[in-house]
Image (cartoon, rainbow, N blue to C red):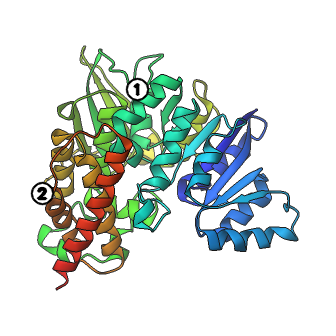
Amino acid sequence: MKGICILGATGSIGVSTLDVVARHSSLYKVIALTANTNIDTLYEQCLEHHPEVVVVVDERNAQIFAEKLKNSTIADIKVLSGAKALEHVATLDNVDSVMAAIVGAAGLLPSLAIVGAAGLLPSLAAAKAGKTILLANKEALVMSGSIFMQAVTESGAQLLPIDSEHNAIFQCMPAGYKTGVQAKQARRILLTASGGPFRETPVDQLIHVTPDQAVAHPNWDMGRKISVDSATMMNKGLEMIEACILFDMTPDQIQVVIHPQSVIHSMVDYVDGTVLAQMGNPDMRIPIAYSMAWPERFDSGVEPLNIFDVGRMDFHEPNLARFPCLRLAYEAIDAGGIMPTVLNAANEIAVEAFLNEQVRFTDIPLIIERCMKKFEAKAADTLEIILDADQQARLVSAQIIGELNN
């Protein structure tokens, strides 16, 4: 039986992971769960899975949660709080696998003093500890790609991607493939994208998009931040950067393909002309189950794909005038150094402002581009440089938002 720690247990990935765990309770034991403010959902998860320890990052909510446990049947669960506690549970001796599902670089931590810690640092700690990392937090690689991959290599950790696209690519790679290594037989990755809810909306109408419209994804059930990223296609831009790092490919070897049906989750083009595609219903339990069972497979709980219901599959090249965030992602990875970190941080601040109705949907790429122009692409060769760039980009982005509102 393998011990699992789920970072971000109450989010959509965390919930789906626990669904898969429940189907294979003889193979996996939940050691640790983490959350920030959603303590009601966390409590229900604890009742069902009885972890040894939970982390409620927000200290006040941790105290409330600890009080809630006192007179319950699960009063023996240890409750921790704070960012350091995330690193602690990710490196426990009886944890074999870590599901890194905290969204964003800032993730659950609102304070600019510790921005970058929630999503990145516990994932990096797990890598250094040699754990099997089920990586759903793409920002960890976008921010610190070379440092993260070096930690994986030096510790002997196993890195398995959870994003449906990267998991599909991993499945289509040659037998015995290990992330971080270039597969010489593979010449190109075709990274699919649904195109989000606005792929056919006239560009001049995007200025009127509301947060509720932007989070209504046509195919996937995702959190609000990721749904907005899908609508701007920044999500695909970050995935392109992550794919370069995970599969040791250059940006010109990653072709983004709009595929509205979301049946093909990505493809690998081989040197002999073969193109391998991974297909399935749009349900995150498929990549989660694949990574948990790897190198075997087991039931994910997802209904089999009925190809006759699909009927047709369409493919389009993305329009960069409609999706400027995708263009900015290519510019950031081409520039290298700290620029992907700056891109990601600016995007997080811009999306948060949009969701709070402080800026318009079309202001998101504007804020990111203006922020990127304030930075030089210096080398991102230490964690301190990366976290400093992250914080500075957030401050600059907040200033730009202030200027837009004046």
Q: Which mark is on residue 373?
A: 2
Quadrant of the image for the N terminus?
Answer: top right
Q: Nearer the viewer, residue 281 or 334?
A: 334
Closer to the N terminus: mark 1 or mark 2?
A: 1
Q: Which mark is on residue 125?
A: none
How far is mark 1 from mark 2, CA to CA?
A: 37 Å
Residue, x 70% and y 35% (percent of image)? Answer: 93
* Observer able to see residue 389: yes
Residue, x 58% and y 33% (percent of image)? Answer: 129
Judging by the rendered image, the residue that carries numbered circle 1 is 172
Circle 1 residues within 10 Å: few <14, some 14–19, many ≥20: many
Foreground disc of the pair 1, 2:
2
Q: Is residue 121 above or below residue 152?
A: below
Image coords of residue 154 (percent x, y):
48, 23
Q: Residue 27 sits in which quadrant?
A: top right
Q: Secondary structure at mark 1?
A: helix
Image coords of residue 182 (percent x, y):
32, 20
Q: Secondary structure at mark 2?
A: loop
